[in-house]
Amino acid sequence: MNTVVPVILCGGSGTRLWPRSRATKPKPFLPLVGDSTLFEATVARCGDPVRFAAPVVVTGTAHLAHVEAQLHGVAGAQVIVEPSARNTAAAIALAALRLPEEAIMLVCPSDHHIGDPQAFAAAAAAAARLAEKDWLVSFGIEAKAPETGFGYLHRGEAIGEGGFKVARFVEKPDLARAEQFLADGGYAWNGGIFAFKVATFLAELGAHRPAILAAAREAVAKGGEDGQRFHPDSVAFARIDSESVDYAVMENTARAAMVPADMAWSDIGNWQALHVALDRDGMGNATRGPVELVDCRNVLVDSDGRNVAVIGLEDVIVVVDGDDVLVTTAAGAQKVGKLHRAANQ
């Protein structure tokens, strides 16, 4: 099999996990689950030299210092510095144009938690085998609940190597449809993890979004190296329309496939999602820092060092970061990103 190259997409606005996460240091660079940051854990999952080549990280100038500090000197790593944010289709195109056409790209968001790295490695191997045969492969995360915040993949016919065709991509459903998907059993969450052969991805991008490919080619051709960094040309890159790889390629290609993945995955998309991913006591509580709970159930308290006491509450989240304090119900956690203060810090 050709070399599998991890392509790690690294960015974020830092609003959904305010006040711990900020625009200057969003969630990929925070130790939210365990002692490693989500970015460090992503790099480590793809660190076996028998399975993976050195990673390619695509990030912006604002996060470059965090990326380089948390790469910890991984030999051969390349960092592509986007001159502006243009969503995942453009970011993946930059990486593809810097790699050999026969290479297999394993595209990984940098801000997800995967509790079962062995299951991830098995799914990555299955996806790479399909990508070798010119399938564009999504990881189909086993749906554990009727989530309305995720897109879904509808599993089609089996195509061997542990994979299936994608019958259709489904946008974020309402609760009733999400419950139907869960009961059906033929739907999986679209976790935004992909495997592509470089040549196949570029051909499909050129077929469906030729303007994105042309501008990305020009940006790479006119770009320059600076040690492990690569800087695409900013003028050419700025002409690219901002579009996700899902809309630009995956929903249009006839080569869309999926591999099932049950790997204790979470996108850590809000404080309640983090609460679910953490170890909890017998009452469903999770704490970090100097915290005392009395008669609480399903409570998350995350303190940066200030003493916090919570009494008699249920389904509540409390976060203390410096002078900023967040108190929300578990249900309200999805609205944290709408806070005006969160969006501007």
Image (cartoon, helix red, strand yellow):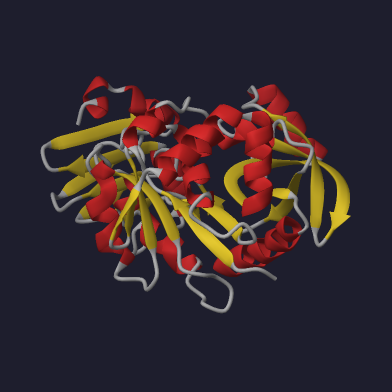
The image quarter containing residue 50 is bottom right
Q: Total of numbered circles in the picture? A: 0
**Which residue does the image show at 86% across and 53% down from the upper left?**
159
Q: Which of the pair 256/90 is nearer the observer?
A: 90
The image quarter containing residue 249 is top right
Residue 34, image x and y in percent? 36, 63
Q: Is residue 244 left or right of residue 223?
A: right
**Which residue does the image show at 46% across and 53% down from the upper left?**
8
Q: Which of the pair 7/176 is nearer the observer?
A: 7
Residue 189, image x and y in percent? 65, 41
Q: Residue furthest left?
A: 323
**Which residue does the image show at 19% across and 35% down from the upper left?**
325
Q: Is residue 287 left or right of residue 54?
A: left
Q: Residue furthest bottom?
A: 50
Q: Which of the pair 204/138 is nearer the observer?
A: 204
Q: Which of the pair 53/336 is nearer the observer?
A: 53
Tell me, yes or no, if residue 244 can be seen here.
Answer: no
| Quadrant placement of the N terminus | bottom right
**Which residue does the image show at 72% across and 31% down from the upper left?**
252
Q: Is residue 292 left or right of residue 36?
A: left
Residue 101, image x and y in percent? 61, 57
Q: Is residue 233 above or below residue 96?
A: above
The image quarter containing residue 21 is top left
| Quadrant placement of the C terminus | top left
Residue 291, image x and y in percent? 23, 53
Tell me, yes or no, if residue 156 can be seen here.
Answer: yes
